Image (cartoon, grey):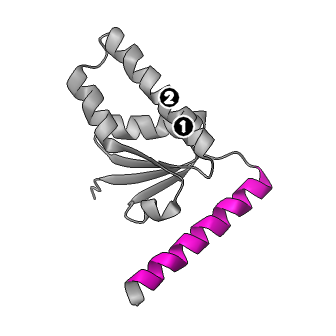
Amino acid sequence: MNFKVNDAAIIGAGFMGYSIAFLCAQNGIRTVNVDVSQEQINTAKTKTNNLLIKLLDKEKINIEDSKNIKKNLVYSTDYIDIKDSQVVIEAVPEIHSLLINIQIQKFSDMLMLLKKVWL
């Protein structure tokens, strides 16, 4: 049985999270990299852009590849943005308070989504 993933979500925009998100986007998957911290999102964006420049300089990718990766990669602090994802990968530190905050945010966003759908 084959299953093609078109939409993925990566929870966590630290080193692991943005790296996984980059690889998904590089392979043509629309990817949302979500994190509770806007600062972490900003860092992930910067590191991703630096990686694209490095790959372009080393001729590992071309301009079209770079554009496609950027097109496929979305960053967010709002869990509602991952509602259409077929696959969700969690890449966050095992910090109990952080995991609880993520679960509360996801639950809250899901309730808002259900309200919009049902009302």
Q: Quadrant of the N terminus?
A: bottom left
Q: Main secondary structure of the magenta part?
A: helix
Q: Label 1 belongs to which residue? A: 42
Q: Amino acid at mark 2?
A: Thr
Apparent side of residue 64 relative to residue 75 in the rendered image (left or right): left
Magenta stretch encompasses residue 103: yes
Classify 10 Å Cα crowding around label 2: few (below 14), some (14-19), many (20 and above).
few
Secondary structure of the residue carrying numbered label 2: helix
- Estimate the x, y position of residue 83 in percent, counting from the top left: 42, 66
| Residue drawn at the location 31% of the way across and 43% of the way down | 72
Q: Amino acid at mark 1?
A: Asn
Choose top left, top right, bottom left or bottom right for residue 58.
Answer: top left
In the image, farthest residue toward the bottom: 119
User: Can I make out residue 5 in this image?
Assistant: no
Q: Label 2 belongs to which residue? A: 46
Q: How many marks?
A: 2
Tell me, for residue 2, which label it has, or none.
none
Question: Is residue 65 or residue 88 the one in the foreground?
Answer: 65
